[in-house]
């Protein structure tokens, strides 16, 4: 019997913007990175922030109004897309 694992952090039918950012960051395709950046911008529910989770059918439904880890990963993706590297 298959068991569903659902928590307040992973409601059914929700996707994590963090996971989308990681997908793009690990892609070698600039086109894929741009596609995911566009998607992330389009699912911010008008807040201009990344959320913890987004309902795949309605981005107006989300967990956490803002989520610093997701925002940081979005920033990392933007920097990666524009070939910005921070050197020590």
Image (cartoon, helix red, strand yellow):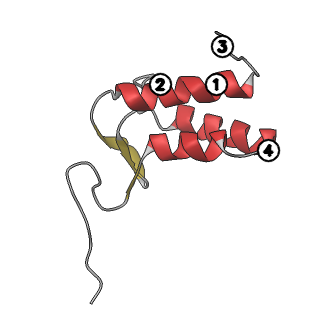
Q: Nearer the viewer, residue 88 or 27?
A: 88
As drawn, the label of residue 86 is 3
- The residue at the far top in this view is 88
As drawn, the label of residue 10 is none
Q: Are marks 1 and 4 in contact (CB under 8 Å)?
A: no
Q: Are marks 3 and 4 in contact (CB under 8 Å)?
A: no
Query: To which quarter of the image does residue 21 belong?
Result: top right
User: Residue at (38%, 46%) from the top-left corner?
Assistant: 54
The earlier-in-sequence mark between 2 and 3 is 2
In 3D space, how far apart are the residues under numbered discs 1 and 4 (Cα atoms)?
14 Å
Name the mark nearer the viewer: 3 or 1: 3
**Residue 41 percent across, percent down from the top left:** 55, 31
In 3D space, how far apart are the residues under numbered discs 2 and 1 (Cα atoms)?
10 Å
In 3D space, how far apart are the residues under numbered discs 3 and 1 (Cα atoms)?
13 Å
Name the mark nearer the viewer: 3 or 4: 3
Q: Are marks 3 and 1 in contact (CB under 8 Å)?
A: no
Local secondary structure at mark 2: helix
* Residue annotated with mark 1: 78
The earlier-in-sequence mark between 2 and 1 is 2
Query: To which quarter of the image does residue 49 belong?
Result: top left
The earlier-in-sequence mark between 3 and 1 is 1
Residue 51 sits above or below residue 49 on the image? below
Q: Nearer the viewer, residue 11 or 56?
A: 11
**Residue 1 percent across, percent down from the top left:** 27, 90
* Residue annotated with mark 4: 29
């Amino acid at each position: 019997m298959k068991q569903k694992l659902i928590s307040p952090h992973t409601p059914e039918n929700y996707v994590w913007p963090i996971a989308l950012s990681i997908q793009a960051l690990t892609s070698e395709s600039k086109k894929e990175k741009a596609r995911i950046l566009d998607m992330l911008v389009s699912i911010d529910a008008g807040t201009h922030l990344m959320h913890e989770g987004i309902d795949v059918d309605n981005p107006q439904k989300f967990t956490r109004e803002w989520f610093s880890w997701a925002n940081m990963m979005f920033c990392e993706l933007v920097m990666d897309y524009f070939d910005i590297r921070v050197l020590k």
